[in-house]
Amino acid sequence: MRIVQNFSSIELNFNPTDKRLPLKYEHLENKKIQAMYLLSSIPDVTIKSPYADKDITDMGILGTEDFFLNFVDIQQNEVVKNLCFNYGYFMFNCSDNNFVEYNIDRLIDIQKSYIQYMINTGDHIRTLLLLVFYQTENYKPFTDEIKGSATFTIAPTATYEDILLKDIISNKLAGKLVKRIIARDTNNFDLLSYLDLYAYDGKRIENIPTTILKQSGQKTIYFDNLNIDWTKSYFRQRGVRERERDNEVFTHANIELTFIY
Amino acid sequence: MENKLISGIFGMEIIVRGTKILFPDTPQLKGKRIKHIEFMNSSVLPKTHNDVTVVSDTSNMYVTLVNNGTSDELIQRLNVNSFNVNGDRLFINKIIDFNRSYIEYTGADNQTGEAVFILFYYDEPAAWSAINTNNRTVIKSLELMLTGRKTYFPYDQEFVNRKILSLLLLFPQISALGSDVVNSTHINNKFITLSRKNVEFFSNVPISIFWQDDNYYQLRLQGIIIDFQKSFVYSLTETANDKKTLFFNLIIDDNK
């Protein structure tokens, strides 16, 4: 179980001719980092970046690619040394949302933190998403007891589409403190989308991949009681997978979002 | 369900003879609280640490475990394959009377002389530490270049008296320090022994259990403290594929 207070997706572009990518991103500065993971695509299932019509690289078929996170805190302690992103412990993809929990709980020195990498095959830039869980204030008291929920269906019509949640979400959720969101593709396809959420109290869930919000029976992600501003928050479709079943091709499946408060 | 915190693991080899096979005398487990047990089949462990072939016909193999100090059969004729489903290990939480526990085998007798291999996960006070509630952690890498059948870990000040919460085996092509890493297809012949103050609290443990990438639930270590210079990896073979580097990430408690 992980309680998410704030979240940020950062698009990383790895040039094969280099070996080190500094984490000099303002998203990370003065934020108490809890954990970082990577998001990749997988063969035949490509998700796009939330920020541009650009594919997230499929890991696994391109040859030798090794990524190691190195994180120095502002007291100059080396708190993460060579965390290997290559496998599902610390990497999400469009179909696998298992992960290993850890809790760094520190402010990062962005000048000294970096990802060391080795790409030995192909000369094209690899694009991956760095998923950052961070904290800006004390957590609210938490219970996983459900007070209520509401489910809404979104029907994307394009591969790259932004849908304002205000147009989807009913008043039932007005003022409710959301502690969990469950995403589901109604055709049970992989989820290729993001939720970009603003809360009234300043908390920010910036483009969290819906694939990690699937109900999987494994580890669960909770939120720190989000009072979401639906007028500023978006569902972002970033890819479509077609699948043939019984001679019928399914595309643009509907997405169900269940908000639990 | 999540695995329970453990601080000891013992790999037990039980040689098949007859239809009722008693557990061997195992001083390391006497009086220890067993948290989980896990059967390892021949596809994940072809040979034991003593180079004995692991049984392949397990459909007719049943375990009975007797609760210590009682006549209570805590586990009664449970098929060995039920002990581990993708990391979801049965929670025992009892002290077992191994002298009265046994395995029944009702299949063909051509497996005589082969071994059943069971891992016992237990509480070992010699190695455990209290876990702080806020779980502040650091993550470090540990590389071990295998040089032969038995390779001891090097001394590293960074790990002295550190409370380890998780030990994850990974397979980058090239390690962070630039070494060739052992391929995942070459780990089922390797075993790890970890010690603290002359107590071997991980004994004969197949290293493959630390490759937990596909497991629903990872092992949870109770802040174990390791004397690395007294700890080693044993390999059944010494081919070129064996003489490469093992790469681990360690999640370490960092509450001061």
Image (cartoon, rainbow, N blue to C red):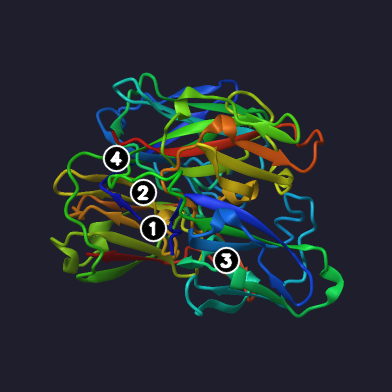
- The residue to which callout 2 is attached is A208
Proximity of marks 4 and 3: CB atoms separated by less than 8 Å = no
Residue in the picture at 74% in, 60% down: B42
SS at circle 2 = strand
Q: Amino acid at mark 3?
A: Val
Please say whether residue A94 is visible from this viewpoint. yes
| Residue B60, position as x, y percentages in the image | 72, 78
Quote the CA–CA distance across marks 4 and 1. 17 Å
| Residue A116, position as x, y percentages in the image | 52, 26
Q: Nearer the viewer, mark 2 or mark 3?
A: 3
Q: Say whether residue A177 is left or right of residue B147.
A: left
Q: Earlier in the sequence, mark 4 or mark 2?
A: 4
| Residue A218, position as x, y percentages in the image | 44, 61
**Picture quadrant of residue A182:** bottom left
Quote the CA–CA distance across marks 4 and 2. 13 Å
Quote the CA–CA distance across marks 2 and 1. 9 Å
Mark on residue B85? 3
**Picture quadrant of residue B187:** top right
